[in-house]
């Protein structure tokens, strides 16, 4: 049985078909921004998880999950987010609601837990996450947080992230609202006119530090990073920056729009994945300020970094030319950059999808992808398996939930999600990406897996 016949045996739910398209051959757009279909086994996470992945890297805050212990265990150490100082964020605290708490209410337990943890760890602020159970029993989490905040004189913020309320994207919104609640209350004196906030970078494997060093060399002050290596005091001053640079648009555009409306801070979208988009992001920031020395330093920085990595890119491209990849990520904006990065390595993207893309994102993907590329929104495990087999790809780029799909089908895998331990942002990140893709795709092990044996015998 060849790859096409095997993929045909893997079903796609009829109700899911509007969320699947092929570049260049479908007249309609990809249906998106809707709740997952029951029974589809979506790769998405819940609202609560969406809020946790955004707020988790704030390193000097207390993060308390109000709910059963399973929710805390599920999201413990959920990002490879590094800190240059405190590591309170890496401790997973929970009120551990039991049956008696569900019957009689968990507000008193939450109150006592907050007092004990704040006294012991002295955090700069506390985030309290509501889970599904809390939404069902009706605990007034905001009231408890306000009470404790007044007593302890620190911000104690309720994150309204009950898992059943919607999709992962709704969790992003809850996290943005929590960050917004910190702003506008302290002085912004001393902030440079040439200053930015970096939104939507989470310092995975130290990527925030790479990006901040670029801006330091350009002469641009970074007021706050939200939320990679984040600090409460910096976030509270973020409304004094001149520009917001939004990387993960799915998670942080809501906050950028709030800051534009409330404080008059414009924002631009940027990506630090790949050579082309990293250079564009730096040039866009330099152009915004219109300062000749900043622009000249930016040009020098980009030239220097490209000269450093292009010999490696050229070597990898010789072996990777003509190979095919499947890409499935959280936000579609990252997918744009990955397609360009793979193209620079000589590879074609045959399948691309995201969990939280919007209509505009999928329109861009239609134009960016080569004809017949499969474009999918909120895919299930079976759908991804079907498309990987149909396109007979050499590499699958995704997250921890997609890794088993790739390995079971005999396909090389590259982790590009928030659990990874290798920096893939910036010019240095592109070099790491090229090495990882090259080592994975060219590994001799793939000659011995059943999928490759079948293809070899057929040809």
Image (cartoon, rainbow, N blue to C red):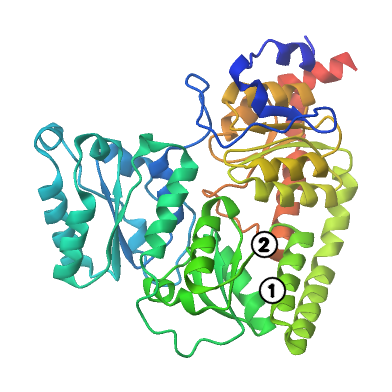
Q: Secondary structure at mark 1?
A: helix
Q: Position of residue 25 (x, y in %)?
A: 84, 27
Please indicate, yes or no, whether residue 412 appears anywhere in the rendered image.
yes
Lower position in the chain sequence, tag 2 or tag 1: 2
Q: Residues within 10 Å of mark 1 (few under 14, many from 20)?
A: many
Which residue bears the numbered disc 1? 285
Tell me: residue 125, above or below residue 295: above
User: Could you tell me how many numbered marks the image carries?
Assistant: 2
Tell me: residue 339, above or below residue 10: below
- Tell me what residue is drawn at x 77 percent, y 33 percent: 394
Rendered image quadrant of residue 46:
top left
- Tell me what residue is drawn at x 66 percent, y 50 percent: 334
Tell me: residue 195, above or below residue 144: below
Q: Position of residue 389 (x, y in %)?
A: 73, 22
For the N terminus, the quadrant is top right
Left or right: 217 in relation to 260: right
Q: Which mark, by number, is residue 270?
A: 2
Q: Residues within 10 Å of mark 2 (few under 14, many from 20)?
A: many
Tell me: residue 33, above or below residue 64: above
């Amino acid at each position: 049985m060849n790859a096409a016949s095997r993929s045909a045996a893997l079903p796609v739910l009829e109700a899911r078909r509007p969320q699947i398209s092929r570049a260049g051959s479908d007249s309609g757009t990809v249906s998106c921004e809707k709740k997952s279909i029951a029974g589809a086994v979506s790769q998405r996470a819940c609202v609560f998880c969406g809020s946790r992945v955004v707020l988790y890297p704030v390193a000097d805050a207390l993060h308390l999950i109000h709910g059963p212990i399973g929710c805390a265990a599920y999201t413990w150490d959920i990002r490879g987010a590094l800190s240059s100082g405190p590591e309170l964020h890496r401790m997973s605290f929970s009120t551990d609601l039991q049956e008696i708490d569900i019957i009689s209410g968990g507000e008193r337990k939450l109150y006592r837990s907050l007092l004990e943890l704040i006294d012991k760890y002295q955090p700069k602020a506390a985030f309290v996450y509501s889970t599904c159970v809390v939404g069902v029993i009706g605990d007034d989490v905001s009231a408890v947080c306000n009470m404790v905040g007044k007593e302890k004189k620190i911000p104690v913020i309720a994150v309204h992230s009950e898992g059943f309320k919607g999709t992962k994207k709704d969790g992003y919104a809850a996290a943005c609202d929590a960050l917004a609640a910190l702003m506008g209350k302290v002085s912004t004196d001393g902030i440079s006119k040439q200053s930015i906030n970096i939104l939507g970078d989470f310092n995975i494997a130290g990527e925030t530090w790479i990006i901040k060093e670029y801006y330091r060399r350009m002469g641009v002050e970074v007021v706050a990073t939200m939320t990679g290596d984040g600090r409460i005091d910096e976030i509270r001053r973020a409304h004094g920056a001149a520009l917001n640079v939004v990387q993960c648009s799915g998670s942080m555009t809501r906050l950028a729009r709030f800051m534009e409306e409330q404080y008059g801070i414009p924002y631009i979208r940027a990506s630090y994945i790949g050579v082309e988009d990293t250079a564009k992001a730096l040039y866009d920031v330099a152009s915004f300020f219109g300062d000749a020395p900043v622009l000249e330093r930016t040009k020098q920085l980009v030239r220097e970094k490209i000269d450093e990595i292009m010999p490696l890119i050229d070597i990898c491209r010789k072996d990777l030319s003509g190979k095919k990849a499947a890409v499935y990520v959280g936000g579609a904006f990252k997918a744009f950059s990955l397609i360009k990065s793979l193209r620079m390595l000589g590879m074609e993207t045959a399948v691309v999808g995201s969990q939280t893309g919007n209509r505009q994102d999928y329109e861009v993907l239609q134009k960016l992808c080569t004809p017949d590329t499969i474009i999918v929104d909120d895919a299930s495990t079976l759908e991804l398996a079907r498309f990987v087999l149909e396109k007979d790809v050499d590499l699958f780029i995704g997250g921890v939930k997609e890794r088993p799909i790739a390995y079971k089908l005999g396909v090389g895998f590259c982790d590009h999600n928030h659990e990874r331990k290798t920096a893939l942002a910036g010019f240095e990140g592109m070099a790491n990406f090229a090495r990882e893709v090259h080592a994975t795709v060219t590994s001799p092990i793939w000659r011995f897996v059943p999928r490759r044996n079948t293809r070899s015998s057929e040809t």
